[in-house]
């Protein structure tokens, strides 16, 4: 079957996401919640697609099923509950753990099971499971924005499905035999290159659509565990369970070195050869050894890129994903969405100019975005740095909103 959505040369993951979201909305294929942009899209016919799960031998044979909490997967969660299977759903954004187990009341009616399969039901009828829980999952069902018939998968850009699977590997909940299924509209089956995938990206074995059941025969290995070199300290804070898994793997003698700030800047397929330390950065004085902070004894000249004319519907997570994919991940991102702009801090002019080249011609949701060097005002000590708004000439206080690029 020929793909509905065609891609032009040089496409990125974000280009594919945008085309899928636009196509679903423009052709009135979307279901609540809308718009589908920046979501795993709920689509008309999702229940029919979900019912195809019953045709899979693995579904009929397994007892424990892990299903993502996305709206279009409600039908799979309902089928699992009606089949009296153990239903596991990821804890929202992994803030308090990894799994929640859905526990319907004894004698629950079909209507109550339907409630349990919704996002509200997940909140009202679930209990958290700890890392010591004996969980063995033979079937994992994930949402997707796009997927290829070869099994390559693209999510909405935040990486939670990939992270959840890697964490399940780390806790021994899945094996190389665990089957991964995704549920999408037919238009979300897109022909794109495997080259877009990274080693942490999750692939799928079956694709369920309203009209087809596709066995991908995917031979690409799934994530073999958590790639700690891609995990930042900020992520460790936001996802506390990572700390427990890190301690567990460290005791097992595994390499658990975390990503450094320099790694964040270099995280790209199109890495340029460029010194990461500015020649203008002063040497740390001996006073540092006497307990003074870096802020008192060093002054670092950062270079800042201005991003303007950002579409109103754009989320900071989308911009972060674009920056990572284009090799333009900054040290710090200052988001001012209400003013349709953002500021990207880089360690030096070389890094900033590299980012400018990477972001040249950038458009988001079909709208051209302004990318240029910002005129920065660098002040010493405890004074604050600001940026001059190129349109109004107003000095904008940088400290109002600062967001690390690695958090999505």
Image (cartoon, rainbow, N blue to C red):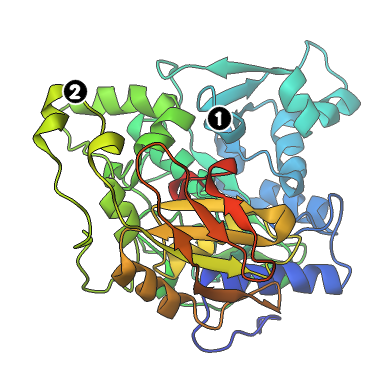
Q: In the image as oriented, which residue stretches furthest toward the bottom?
A: 9
The residue sitting at 46% across, 46% down in the picture is 404
In the image, is 314 to the left or to the right of 281? Answer: right
On the image, the x and y values in percent for residue 271 come to: 29, 71
Q: What element does badge 1 sit on? A: strand
In the image, taking residue 334 as reference, residue 187 lies left or right, namely right
- Relative vertical location of residue 273 with respect to residue 230 in this rendering, above or below: below
Q: Quadrant of residue 146?
A: bottom right
C-alpha gap between disc 2 and disc 1: 54 Å
Pick whichever of labels 2 and 1 is earlier in the sequence: 1
Q: Is residue 258 left or right of residue 102?
A: left
Residue 196 drawn at (x, y percent): 43, 71
Marks 2 and 1: which is nearer the front?
A: 2
Residue 299 appearing in the image:
yes
Which of the 4 image quarters holds residue 337?
Answer: bottom right
Closest to the observer: 70 or 395? 395
Q: Residues within 10 Å of mark 2 (few under 14, many from 20)?
A: few
**Residue marked by disc 2:** 291
């Amino acid at each position: 079957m020929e793909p509905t959505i065609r891609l032009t040369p040089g496409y990125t993951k974000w280009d594919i996401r945008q085309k899928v979201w636009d196509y679903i909305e423009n052709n009135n294929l979307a279901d609540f919640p809308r718009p589908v942009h920046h979501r795993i899209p709920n689509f008309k016919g999702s229940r029919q697609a979900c019912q195809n799960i019953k045709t899979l031998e693995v579904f009929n044979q397994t007892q424990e099923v892990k299903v993502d909490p996305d709206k279009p997967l409600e039908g799979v969660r309902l089928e699992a509950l009606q089949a009296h299977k153990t239903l596991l759903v990821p804890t929202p954004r992994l803030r308090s753990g990894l799994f929640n187990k859905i526990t319907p009341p004894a004698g629950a009616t079909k209507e109550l099971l339907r409630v349990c399969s919704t996002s509200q039901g997940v909140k009202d009828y679930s209990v958290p499971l700890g890392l010591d829980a004996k969980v063995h999952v033979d079937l994992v069902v994930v949402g997707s924005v796009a997927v290829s018939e070869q099994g390559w998968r693209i999510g909405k850009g935040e990486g939670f499905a990939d992270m959840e699977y890697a964490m399940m590997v780390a806790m021994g909940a899945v094996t190389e035999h665990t089957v991964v299924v995704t549920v999408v509209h037919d238009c979300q089956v897109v022909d794109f290159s495997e080259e877009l995938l990274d080693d942490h990206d999750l692939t799928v074995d079956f694709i369920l659509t309203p009209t087809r059941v596709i066995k991908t025969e995917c031979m690409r290995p799934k994530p073999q565990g958590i790639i700690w070199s891609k995990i930042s300290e900020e992520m460790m804070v936001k996802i506390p369970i990572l700390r427990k898994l890190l301690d567990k793997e460290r005791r097992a003698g595994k390499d658990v070195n975390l990503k450094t700030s320099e790694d964040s800047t270099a995280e790209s397929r199109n890495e340029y050869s460029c010194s990461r330390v500015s020649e203008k950065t002063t040497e740390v004085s001996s006073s540092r050894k006497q307990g003074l902070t870096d802020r008192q004894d060093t002054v670092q000249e950062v270079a800042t890129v201005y991003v303007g004319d950002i579409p109103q519907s754009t989320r900071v997570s989308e911009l972060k994903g674009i920056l990572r994919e284009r090799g333009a991940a900054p040290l710090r991102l200052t988001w001012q969405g209400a003013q349709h702009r953002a500021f990207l801090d880089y360690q030096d002019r070389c890094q900033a100019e590299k980012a400018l080249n990477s972001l040249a011609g950038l458009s988001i949701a079909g709208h051209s975005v302004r990318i240029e060097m910002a005129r920065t005002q660098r002040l010493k000590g405890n004074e604050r740095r600001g940026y001059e708004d190129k349109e109004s000439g107003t000095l904008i206080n940088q400290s109002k909103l600062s967001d690390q690029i690695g958090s999505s």
